[in-house]
Image (cartoon, grey):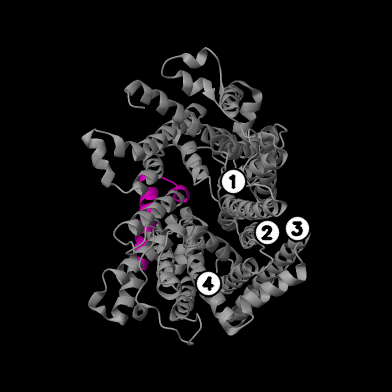
Amino acid sequence: MMIARIFRQIWNTATALTLAALVCAVVLVLAIGAAALLGYPPLRVADLWLHGAAGSWYSLSSSCADACPLLLTGLAAGVAFRAGVLNIGAQGQFLMGALVAVALSTRMMIFHQPALVIATALTGGALAGGIWGLIAQYLERYRAVPVVLSTILLNFVALYLVAAALQGPLQAVGTAAAQSPEIAGKYWLPLFVPYTDFHIGIILAFMLSVLLWVVQERTVFGFESHVVGLNPDTAKAMKMPVAWRQFQIMFISGGCAGLGGAIQVLGQVHFMTAHMGDYGYAGIAVALLGRLNPLGIILSAVFFGFLDTGAFRVEESSLALPHDLADVIKAVVILVMLVLAGISLRRSRRAAKSERTTSAETPSA
Amino acid sequence: MNTAPNMITFLSRQTVTAATPMILAGVGELVGELSGVINIGIEGSMLMGCIAAYTVTGVTGHGTAGLLAAMVTGMVMAVIFAAATVWGRADQIVAGTAMDLLGVGLSGMIWMMYQNWRENLGFSTALPHGSGFSPLAIPLLRDIPFVGPAFFEQYLLCYLTICLCVGVWWMLNHTRLGLIIQALGDAPEACHAAGVRVRLGRSMCLLFAGTCAGAAGAYLSIMQTHAFAADMTGGEGFVVLALVIFGRWKLPGLVGGCLFFGLINSLQQTLQTARYTSQNSVLHALTHVPFQFFQMLPYLAAIAALAVMSRNSPGPRYINIPWPSAKT
């Protein structure tokens, strides 16, 4: 019984992964075909792309380092979407997390102890992201503002807030640009392979996604939040604390994104500007490609990390193919996955509703 | 700009200029939402409209060609979105986010390739002289004090937008077509029973919305600024979404909201410069506020407006529910 269940779970995951891999392969072939149509030599593009993403230990490590923030924003979107909380604001939460982490590691270094500073910066970043997310959830619960809209609008508020801080209290000495000073080397996240980009943030993100998988699949909290996402009415009828679960999920989701921002500044870029990349928006694509499953999200984040890093190398080469092509590929992957795999929150909600009506009819029949 | 009447004239004209693209995109979005489809991705359609208008105007030298190209581009984006959501039953919110990502990525990519191409040919990437639109003043009417320049010294597209607003308002409230559109979003099963093809109808509404968003993008790039920059819409598409809710899915409310935001936007821009030159002590004290807080104002105002207005305004019942509802 138990073995059969585990086997079925593995089988389901395997089919989902095959589907995702197929979609990725087809989209990649299409993208290289598009590059060929635009007059770029397709084989050279593919070659540069592969070598840029995984041609050496160093490029492999920078792909993984790029996958790390994507994994965390992907988890942010995945956890929230699974519970029906449409948090599109991972970008703003990511920025707030990065901002607090920079403040804690360049201005307010606790006791100047590297371990303490890193721990407080990461925790502070995660808390900042979580609290930024809670604002949106508060507005939905008590002011009936749709979370979708408030999170998007809060992204822009966060962007300008970060820009103001980086030109004000956090600005580096001797520059007019919106830029923080560089974090001192001893507060960087330690590397676990020297002379590469493999920093311990990658391991942390990996462990967090395994932890979230366990919480989602093996705890009452995970089960209840899934029911809240499938059908809030059922959840309410089953006496589940719907609003409380939504607040918790939003805090976890925002916290993941904020931690992503903190890890990105402490582990990868080591200083902050207002242009930190579109990791928050890309996280939605990562989550969907991973079918909202934390373990699937690891694979899709790694895939997108390779995609991005390779695209930047192709742009830097003599071919100068714009790296925005990677964004286009992501968008197409989301659309194709939405239609093919049917990750429609509403549809599952309706399916749950029809199941409920049939199960209600069965006893009377 | 030193005296108060001049200030009013200036501000009112700036307000209308800033509100026009939002009204244009908002009318389209409103029709789409009334038919039961919410498109989070109009920001992406607007950006694609911007780049299409700019490049086509740059190559052909005709602003009209650019405007048409932007409208066609907006339609193409709408076809993709309709295929995914109306026919493919994808979740509209997530598909809309993908459309936004697509617009940002594709417009950035086209812009970079266009620059390379023009520079290799030895041309400038700026618009040819006189090819963009300039304001079209209507004689006599523009001399009305205060509000004359606001309404009668605007770009061609602004006058068209006013006509479009009146037309759509009349269509929604006084014609059978308007009733059908609202029924598509409120009672699609009734439409189905009456022999109206629900998915086709929704697709048509989305096409209209896409055309409007494309034209709004053209307004930004070849009329208001005569320039293109990556992400030049700067979240305007998202503010429009908030304003549709703010106006409670009614056209006059939407237009009022857009004008209000145009006012806030032009006020904050004026304040940013006026605080340095003004003799007024209150205004002068504002010089200590970082300018980013002024830029933040429209978004904060949008959130505040939603917090005040969105109670008890359910909107079209079938938003984000694909037709046919049950799995077949």
Q: Mark 2 sits on what residue?
A: A336
Residue A262 visible here:
yes
Q: Position of residue A310 (x, y in %)?
A: 63, 71
Q: Name the amino acid, label 1.
A: Leu
Circle number at residue A38:
3
Q: Position of residue A305 (x, y in %)?
A: 57, 71
Q: Mark 4 sits on what residue?
A: A66
Determine the CA span between mark 1 and mark 4: 27 Å
Residue A147 lies in the magenta stretch: yes
| Quadrant of residue B189 within the rendered picture | top right
The residue stretch that appears in magenta: A125-150
Q: Is residue B214 above or below residue A158?
A: above
Q: Is residue A54 above or below residue B15?
A: below
Circle 3 or circle 4, nearest the eye: 3
Circle number at residue B47:
1
Quarter occupied by the N terminus of chain A: bottom right
Q: Are marks 3 and 1 on the same chain?
A: no
Label 1 lies in what chain? B
Residue shown at 44% from the left, 55% from the top = A237
| Quadrant of residue A22 within the rendered picture | bottom right
Label 3 lies in what chain? A
